[in-house]
Amino acid sequence: MNKNDSTLPLNSQNEQLKMLKAKVQGIFATQNLEHQRRLVEAIAAELNISVLDCAATLVMMLSDENPSNILPSKISQPQVVEALPHNLATSIRLVRYRLDVGYQHKVTLEEIKTVLVEESGVDIKNIANLRIQGAYTLIDLPDEMPQEIFHHLKLVEINQQKLDIRRVKPRNKKRGNRMRPRPSIHHLPKK
C-alpha cells in the first residue's frame, strides 16, 4: 500500500464533511426552519434529552436509513431565489403557485424550471420567486395559464412525485360578503 492509498479514506471523509456542511448551509440560508425547530425541541423535551443530542440522533437515523440523504454524492450550491428582470416584471402579471414537490423529494431549482419549461412552454425568464420548502415549492408564473396546461401540470411528476400545481390565494385579499355577520334568530323581526 503506498502513501496516497492510506490518505484516501481521510480525504473522502473530508469531502463528505464539506458536502454535508454545504448542504446544511444551503438549507439554513434558504429555508424557514421554525417548524423543524419546534419539532426537535418537543421530541427532546418529551425524551428528556438535550436538543443537540436529539438532532444528533435524528442525523444518525437518517444516515442509517439512507446515507445519501446525509452525505449526497453531489451537492448543489445554495439555491437562490431568482427575480424577473426589471423590464419584464412591469409588463407581465405573475401569480403565485404551490407545487407538491420539495426538498424531501430531492428536487432542485434547475429540475423544477426544466420541467415547467418543457411541459408548459413557459419562458424560463418568466419563472420567478422559486422557493423550495420541505414538502412543497412556491413559485410565481405568468397569469392566465391555459386550463389544459394547468391540468397537465397537476399530473406531471418530478422524482416520482406529482406536481399537483395549484394557485395560492393572496392572504390580504378582502373576503367580501363573508365578513358580514349573519343574522341570528334572536335578531329577526317578530311576526
Image (cartoon, rainbow, N blue to C red):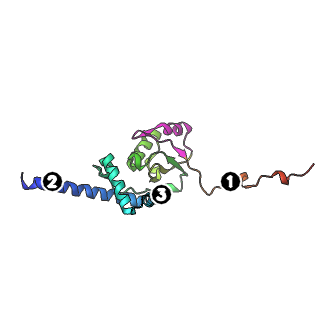
Q: Which mark is residue 8?
A: 2
Mark closer to the chain start, 1 or 2: 2
Mark closer to the chain start, 1 or 3: 3
Of 149 and 154, the residue lying toward us = 154
Q: Look at the image and give the residue range highlighted in magenta.
A: 144-166
> Which amino acid is tagged 2?
Leu
Q: Position of residue 158 (x, y in %)?
A: 41, 41
Q: State the residue position of label 1.
A: 175
Q: What separation in Å lies between label 1 and label 3 (alpha carbons)?
A: 28 Å
- Image-based side of 177 in relation to 117, left or right: right
**SS of the residue under disc 3:** helix
Q: State the residue position of label 3.
A: 35
> Which amino acid is tagged 1?
Arg
Crowding near the residue tagged with mark 3, few <14, some 14–19, many ≥20 C-alpha atoms within 10 Å:
few
Q: Position of residue 145 (x, y in %)?
A: 54, 43
Q: Residue at point 34% right, 50% down?
A: 62
